[in-house]
Amino acid sequence: MTLTMGDRLKELRRERSLSQEIVAQSIGITRSAYSHYEINNRQPVYETLIKLASFFEVTTDFIIDGDTRGTEPQVAADAAEIIRLLNNMDEDKRKESIDKMLDAIRES
C-alpha cells in the first residue's frame, strides 16, 4: 500500500507522540488546518510544507512522496525519543533536562 502525504504526516506526528494541536501551534497554523492535511482534504502551501519538514526533521520530498534520500533517520529517531521523554516529565524535571541539554550543546 502506498502512503499518502497525510499518512506520512500522521505517522511522523505519532512517532513523536505529539498531538495535532502541538504540531499546528509549532508551525503557526490551526489544528483544523493541520488535521485536513492528515486526512488528505487539503495540501499545505509551500511555506507550510517547509515548516513541516523542518519541524519533523525530514525533507520536503519525504513528506510529499516518501523519498528518503538525504534524510538522517537516526537523528530524527533520537529527536522523537527526546520529545517523548520530555512530554512525560513534570514541568520542573523537563526544564532541568532542557537546560542540561542546552549546556551540553553549547560546550560542543
Image (tube, rainbow, N blue to C red):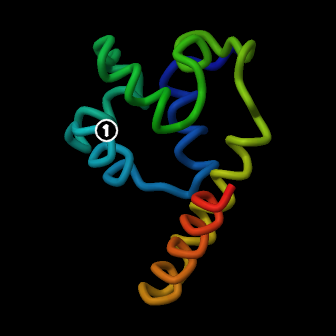
Q: Position of residue 21 (x, y in %)?
A: 31, 52
Q: Amino acid at mark 1?
A: Ile
107 displayed left or right of 92 = right
Looking at the image, how many numbered discs can be counted on the residues?
A: 1
Residue where numbered disc 1 is placed: 27
As rendered, which of 71 and 7 lies closer to the eye?
71
53 displayed left or right of 66 = left
Q: Residue at 79% across / 41% down in the picture?
A: 74
106 displayed left or right of 41 = right
Task: Tell me: residue 100, above or below residue 28.
Answer: below
**Residue found farthest to the right:** 74
Task: Tell me: residue 42, above or below residue 26.
Answer: above
Tell me which corner region of the image, top left, top right, bottom left or bottom right, holds residue 108. bottom right
As rendered, which of 41 and 18 lies closer to the eye?
18
Q: Position of residue 69 (x, y in %)?
A: 74, 13
Assign a secondary structure to mark 1. helix
**Residue found farthest to the front:** 107
Task: Tell me: residue 91, above or below residue 11.
Answer: below
Q: Position of residue 70 (x, y in %)?
A: 72, 16
Q: Residue at 39% across / 20% down in the picture?
A: 49
Tell me which corner region of the image, top left, top right, bottom left or bottom right, holds residue 61. top right
Q: Residue at 61% across / 17% down in the picture?
A: 62
Q: Residue at 72% across / 42% down in the picture?
A: 75
Q: Quadrant of the N terminus?
A: top right
Mark 1: few, some, or many residues within 10 Å (few <14, many ≥20)? some
Q: Position of residue 55 (x, y in %)?
A: 46, 38
